[in-house]
Image (tube, rainbow, N blue to C red):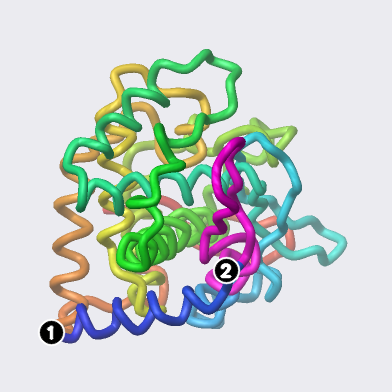
Amino acid sequence: MNRHGSIKNLVTTAWLLLLTPAFAAPNTPAHIYPCGMEAAVKVGNDLYATLDPEFQKIINPESISMAKLDDPLMSPIPGNRQGLLCQVSVSTGFIDLLNHIAHAKAIDRIQPGFFLQYVFVLAHEGADANPAVPPNLDNARYWTDAVMRDQASFFNEMIGITLAMNLSHHYLGHCAKYAAQRPDAKREPINNLIAPDEWEASVKYAALNSLNCAISTDGARALFEFIDQMPQRPAWTGYIMPQSANIKRINEQLARYEHDYFRGGIKMDKAPAELSVASIPNGVHRGVGNK
């Protein structure tokens, strides 16, 4: 087994110990997902711990703020001049959504086509509807140990990349740059505002931050592919990516980042020198953009 596979299996086993209830569909046996709010907070803490100390200065060590809301929301929350540090707000609805997408991806391994079927379900919901659960989720085949190991692994990777991207919006200066255009920072997706090169910088730094925590990019690429295949993207996709994102290109870059990372050819240390300086509300400065 290669190094990547070994790390991924170890991480999956660890998350299976975090049995946090996240789903119980009507008229189905009582099932729980192995990863929930506690797992998301743990991932956030790990991501923070592996950041460069200069990046950590503007981010709260308790980097994740959980909101008990059914709406699937994830957003960087800016700090202020009174010393409150930056965080990422995540709703329970977002955790549920990622659990379901991860589950659909895991089920697809034993029932090819299931992933695309769930794409179709979510893409054709009403604009204001909260995301539906995957179809026929009471099927016992979908809850075997093998499927749930894959589900936990994919969830870990999906929550890792999304949290890491939102953290990067702080230390790359995007959150400060667009603060005036986000009066309700918890609900206004920053991805509706940032430039393409800024988002690509966020993805790169998030991928490296995740890899430093032994989190593979497989789940990130699956999540991006899931959204890319939607002919009509629901509003919640704005919390994950811009409408104009070139997902094929981004996924190719993610695969290359991981390849180079495990061969020692790429590291995440400090912001590259070519990034221009942006003012952060609490006085710390960090770059914006990417070349």
Whether residue 23 is in magenta: the answer is: yes
113 on left or right of 270: left
Residue at x-position 36% and y-position 72%: 215
Q: How crowded is mark 1: few (under 14 residues within 10 Å), some or many (20 or more)?
A: few
In the picture, the disc for residue 61 is: none
Residue topped by disc 1 = 2
Q: Determine which quarter of the picture holds residue 66.
A: bottom right
Give the structural element (helix, strand or loop) at label 1. loop
Residue 222 percent across, percent down from the top left: 27, 49
Residue 280 locus on image (x, y percent): 65, 57
* Residue 95 locus on image (x, y percent): 57, 50
In this picture, residue 261 sits left or right of residue 104 = left
What residue appears at the point 63 percent right and 33 percent down from the top-left corner? 188
Determine the CA span between mark 2 and mark 1. 26 Å
Q: Which amino acid does label 2 sit on?
A: Ala
Instruction: Identify the residue at horizontal 65%, vertical 34% (top origin).
Output: 71
- Where is 82 relative to 227, above or below? below
Residue 39 numbered tag: 2
**Numbered range of the magenta stretch:** 20-43
Magenta highlight on residue 273 = no
Within-10-Å neighbours for mark 2: few <14, some 14–19, many 20+: many
Mark 1 belongs to which amino acid? Asn
Which residue is farthest right?
82
Q: Where is residue 226 in the image (x, y as percent from the top left)?
A: 30, 38
Q: Is residue 226 above or below residue 43?
A: above
